[in-house]
């Protein structure tokens, strides 16, 4: 699950500006969990497209099908990381 990022949470995380979607939970045995996505991560990009907030993330993901693999750029511990995630339907 994800949520929009507030200016205060972006500042605490060390983001240069409030954008992206914050991960509020990860389903056990999900593709996100298997690649190491964690609660508290910030999703900044999907396949090179900037995520401005929760609505943008949903729109980006809806352009793909379950089983598609996407590169996801996240922010964790004041550093950017890239993960390769295989999409799946939410249980």
Image: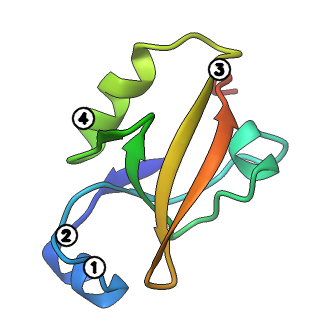
- Residue drawn at the location 21% of the way across and 59% of the way down: 19
Residue on which the image places disc 4: 55
Q: Residue 78, image x and y in percent?
A: 43, 84
Q: Which numbered disc flags the more N-terminal residue, 1 or 4?
A: 1
Residue on which the image places disc 2: 6
Residue 70's place in the image compared with 50, above or below, is above
- Residue drawn at the location 41% of the way across and 17% of the way down: 62
What is the CA distance from the residue labelled 1 to the residue labelled 4? 18 Å
- Residue drawn at the location 22% of the way across and 85% of the way down: 11
Residue 50's tag is none
Mark 1, secondary structure of its residue: helix
For this rendering, which residue is in front, 48 or 75?
48
What is the CA distance from the residue labelled 3 to the residue labelled 1? 28 Å
Mark 4, secondary structure of its residue: helix
- Residue drawn at the location 63% of the way across and 64% of the way down: 38
What is the CA distance from the residue labelled 4 to the residue labelled 3? 18 Å
Residue on which the image places disc 3: 89
Q: Residue 87, image x and y in percent?
A: 64, 26
What is the CA distance from the residue labelled 2 to the residue labelled 3? 27 Å
Circle 1 residues within 10 Å: few <14, some 14–19, many ≥20: some
What is the CA distance from the residue labelled 4 to the residue labelled 2? 14 Å
Q: Which numbered disc flags the more N-terminal residue, 4 or 2?
A: 2
Q: Is 37 displayed left or right of 72 in the figure? A: right
């Amino acid at each position: 699950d994800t949520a929009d990022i507030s200016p205060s949470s972006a500042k605490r995380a060390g983001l240069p500006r409030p954008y992206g979607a914050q991960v509020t939970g990860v389903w056990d045995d999900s593709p996100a969990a298997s690649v190491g996505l964690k609660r508290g991560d910030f999703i900044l990009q999907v396949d090179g497209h900037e995520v401005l907030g929760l609505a943008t993330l949903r729109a980006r993901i809806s352009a793909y099908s379950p089983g598609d693999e996407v590169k996801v750029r996240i922010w964790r511990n004041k550093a950017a990381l890239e993960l390769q995630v295989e999409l799946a339907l939410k249980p």
